[in-house]
Amino acid sequence: MMALISPWIHNGNPTDFLLVKRNIKNIKGECKGFWAECVKNHLMNNSHHLTLVMQMNELYRENMMIKEKAKNKEALSSVLDCEQLYRNGIKLNQDQDQSHRNVHCLPSLQVSDVSRCSHPVCVHHEFAGSVCVQYSEQPTNNITYFQALSGINHLPEELKIYIPLFGAAITQFRTEMFDHRQFSELWELHTSGITAEAFTSAHYKSLLTYEQGVLFSSYCLNDNVSSMFNLWEELFCRYLPIDEQKLRTIINMAANKATMSVTDAGHMYAMRSASNGLTPAANLSEMFFGLTQVRFLNDVREKSDLSDAVMKLNKIAKLLLSSQSLRRCAVNTTSNALPMVSDDVKRFLLSLPGIPSDVSTLSEGTVCVKTEYRKDFKNDSPVNYAAKCFKTAPYSHEDSTRLEVLSKLLTMKYLHKEIREKGGAYGAGAIFRDGIFSFFSYRFVKLTVTVSAHVYNRITRSRAYFYFPFYRIFISITHIL
């Protein structure tokens, strides 16, 4: 609305600026060749330009360390009264150790404010061939959400590490009717786009049982539902093998993204590495989303011949893009669009190639690590990330809810104060997921301090130091629940 004020106050018709298609058509007709001529004259053939060449400085890190030490020395030399500075630090430490703080001025949520009655979500299930489809009627503002899970139990083990790369490459697949550019434009025109990502989860009853697969998802307006499932059908039924040149571009982008994410989310990589070996699901998660995948992508990028990667990705596509692998689907949509969406989902599922299979996506595994062990990874980042993980209870166990509450209490009541406020880290916390209780801190220079403070730095640092504070807090939570 603010953009319409300017023409309005100058006696113009504000609605003319809303006719975007008409204005674009006029520009194309009246300015045909104008922009190409501008680019040619002012950019391509312009002799008045500046060329900037950037070169890597081999001594950059050393120079930064020298400047940092000089800056610290200057700051210390400017302190006139070191004794007063020391006394202020002692007083600050005492103030931070105070257990009773006046928090009445802060907004708070009481237990009495939370309703004791839960409202279950109504869903119903239908079968299209051997695939179970879950439908849920929700006020989605005329948007339909679709997800499908394909199992990978039948994939050879050497192919599973390629699953994240397959998820990145599937968005650039071509089909019998469209090349990869046309197909990508159709997805963007009718939907939010397509995503395919590795999926793993521990079973709610046993930590030795886990589920593995590839999760396909997309969403669109209700008016575009038929077009969305036509595109899904085109992908599953008429895809063509990916070429090596396009795959090299995809691998370079995926490797760069994964490498950069180590600095941005190093604490997540630390938790995945620390939990590796505690449960089978954690092992698979580290291979899909951890440092193992980062190293794998960078190793593949260094290869001059990608024919082996092309062959394996095409083999994965052949095994996964079929009714043999598809296990179940989930659809969230509005009640008035449900009959139409249901017909399109059935049409898509019944058109899939291959012989339907009712093999479960669940797998059984074994625990790899039975004793405490430590791992250390070095990178070029100037900050540290630390994590410590413990195997606990599955989701259906009575202690699962208490552990979830415990993770929130430790994060807000202890770890934030000890590691963030006192230690100066960017953050720290505790997370409970898939039967694994994890402590983490990120961007903290005092690596050894954060490990000792992860539960209580006043308690012995033996292997059993976790259990005493856990038991003490666990008893207090029992009365709350």
Image: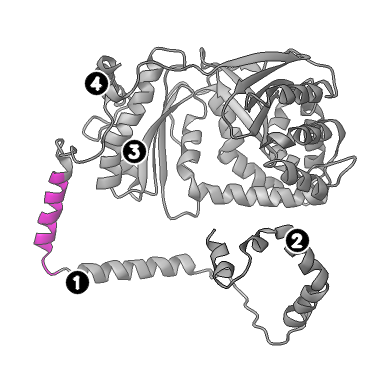
Residue extending farthest to the right is 176
| Amino acid on which the number 1 mark rests in the picture | Ser
Sequence-wise, the earlier of marks 3 and 1 is 1
Residue sitting at x 69%, y 52%:
252
Asked if residue 286 lies in the magenta stretch, the reply is no
- Whether residues under marks 4 and 1 lie with C-beta atoms below 8 angstroms apart, the answer is no
Q: Position of residue 58 (x, y in %)?
A: 53, 68
Q: Which mark is residue 22?
A: 2
Q: What are the residue bounds of the magenta stretch?
A: 80-95
Nearest the viewer among 98 and 87 is 98
Is residue 203 rendered to the left or right of residue 73?
A: right
Is residue 219 rendered to the left or right of residue 128?
A: left
Sequence-wise, the earlier of marks 2 and 4 is 2
| Residue indicated by mark 4 | 472
State the quadrant of the C terminus: top left
- Mark 4, secondary structure of its residue: helix
The part of the image, by quadrant, that contains residue 52 is bottom right
Q: Which mark is residue 451?
A: 3
How far apart are the two marked residues, 1 and 2, measured between alpha carbons? 67 Å
Mark 3 or mark 4, whichever is nearer to me: 4
| Residue indicated by mark 1 | 78
